[in-house]
Image (cartoon, rainbow, N blue to C red):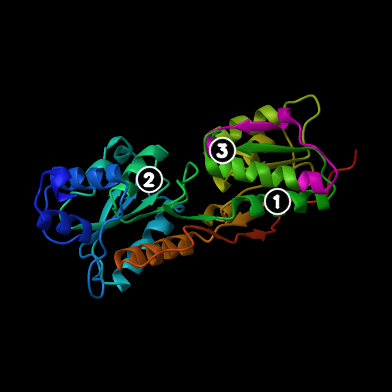
């Protein structure tokens, strides 16, 4: 491999073992040569040493009560492992080309990537360069050999829709997330499964794909409530969109839950600040962060992961915003 890459044997050893100082260009040259030869690198002799350095926590979004909980749990858990944290957060970070430079970045041992906006090909490239990282709540289906942690979106949505069909609802509108999001597909699959369990097929005209915000939730819910035959219940992609649905219902003189049932997803603080309080699905946001760090520490300790894609259970939380289907 040294001969094929045109470098010394010592340089190849430093790259494959993650030790010593090597420039980003040399590291990429050696790793691409290993990949081209389709041969695994030699294993280091003796007990493997943990990869030293800090952990980059990338969350290119506003640290609200959703992302803030995940980031806080990641930072606190890394502190327990005495790993320094470098935070890259805020919407402006979405345009920063961060991933490509991580393998050669001095002092960075690994990364936790929260809902990364980058395409799957970028994650595959990062993994091929043997850089340790874990994805939290992947936006797209993660590559097979990339470690990822998410909530059980399909199971949670199935429980929620089953709750509504159990109350007699048959015409249920869905304020879904963006079409390209993995969580949107999973939750729609869970919704469809619950309808099938009740002997129904979902109607495409009862689904709206929007950004999961209060404003877009209000707009999408208004469109559904203005249909000739309006739904008797609405399920939203998250609690913020559900708040928008409550606003749309109030604007049309509909009482929740007497005239219309409304439910959300996530169980953030906002779900308990509405009137009525929201029925929702609780995501284990703190545990998502803790589990991501657990997987990453094992990678930094050079352990092999057998379970690369981990789903954490969700919980249906029934409150006052859902009720029996209205008469007639």
Q: Which residues are magenta?
A: 194-215
How much space separates mark 3 and mark 1, taking CA atoms?
16 Å
Q: Is residue 46 above or below residue 275?
A: below
Quadrant location of residue 17?
bottom left
Task: Verify whether residue 143 appears in magenta.
Answer: no
How much space separates mark 1 and mark 2, taking CA atoms?
29 Å
Determine the secondary structure under disc 2: loop
Residue ID at (61%, 45%): 186
Q: Is residue 200 above or below residue 77?
A: above
| Location of residue 231 in the rendering, given as x and y in whole percent from the top left corner | 77, 35
Say which mark, if any, is on residue 177: 3
Q: Between tags 3 and 2, which lies in front?
A: 3
Q: Which residue is mark 2?
A: 62
How much space separates mark 3 and mark 2, taking CA atoms?
18 Å
Q: Which residue is mark 1?
A: 158
| Location of residue 188 in the rendering, given as x and y in whole percent from the top left corner | 65, 41
């Amino acid at each position: 491999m040294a001969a094929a890459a045109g470098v010394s044997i010592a340089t190849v050893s430093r790259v494959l073992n993650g030790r010593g100082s090597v420039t980003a260009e040399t590291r990429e040259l050696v790793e691409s040569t290993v990949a081209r030869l389709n041969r695994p690198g030699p294993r280091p002799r003796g007990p493997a040493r943990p990869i030293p350095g800090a952990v980059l926590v990338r969350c290119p979004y506003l640290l609200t009560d959703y992302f803030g909980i995940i980031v806080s749990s990641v930072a606190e858990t890394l502190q327990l492992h005495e790993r320094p944290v470098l935070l890259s957060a805020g919407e402006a970070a979405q345009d920063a080309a961060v991933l490509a430079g991580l393998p050669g970045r001095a002092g960075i041992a690994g990364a936790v990537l929260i809902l990364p906006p980058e395409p799957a090909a970028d994650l595959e490239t990062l993994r091929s360069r043997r850089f340790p990282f874990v994805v939290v709540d992947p936006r797209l289906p993660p590559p097979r050999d990339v470690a990822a942690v998410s909530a059980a979106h399909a199971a949670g949505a199935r429980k929620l829709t089953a709750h509504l069909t159990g109350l007699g609802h048959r015409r249920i509108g869905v304020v879904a997330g963006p079409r390209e999001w993995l969580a949107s597909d999973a939750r729609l699959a869970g919704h469809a499964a619950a309808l099938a369990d009740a002997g129904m097929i979902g109607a495409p005209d009862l689904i709206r794909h929007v950004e999961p915000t209060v404003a877009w939730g209000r707009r999408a819910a208004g469109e559904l409530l203005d249909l000739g035959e309006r739904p008797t219940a609405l399920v939203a992609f998250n609690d913020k969109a559900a708040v928008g649905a409550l606003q749309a219902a109030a604007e049309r003189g509909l009482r929740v839950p007497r005239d219309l049932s409304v439910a959300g997803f996530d169980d953030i603080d906002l779900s308990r600040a509405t009137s009525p309080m929201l029925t929702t699905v609780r995501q284990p946001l703190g545990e998502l962060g803790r589990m991501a760090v657990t997987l990453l520490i094992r990678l930094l300790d050079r352990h092999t992961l057998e379970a690369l894609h981990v789903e954490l259970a969700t919980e249906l939380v029934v409150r006052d915003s859902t009720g029996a289907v209205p008469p007639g």
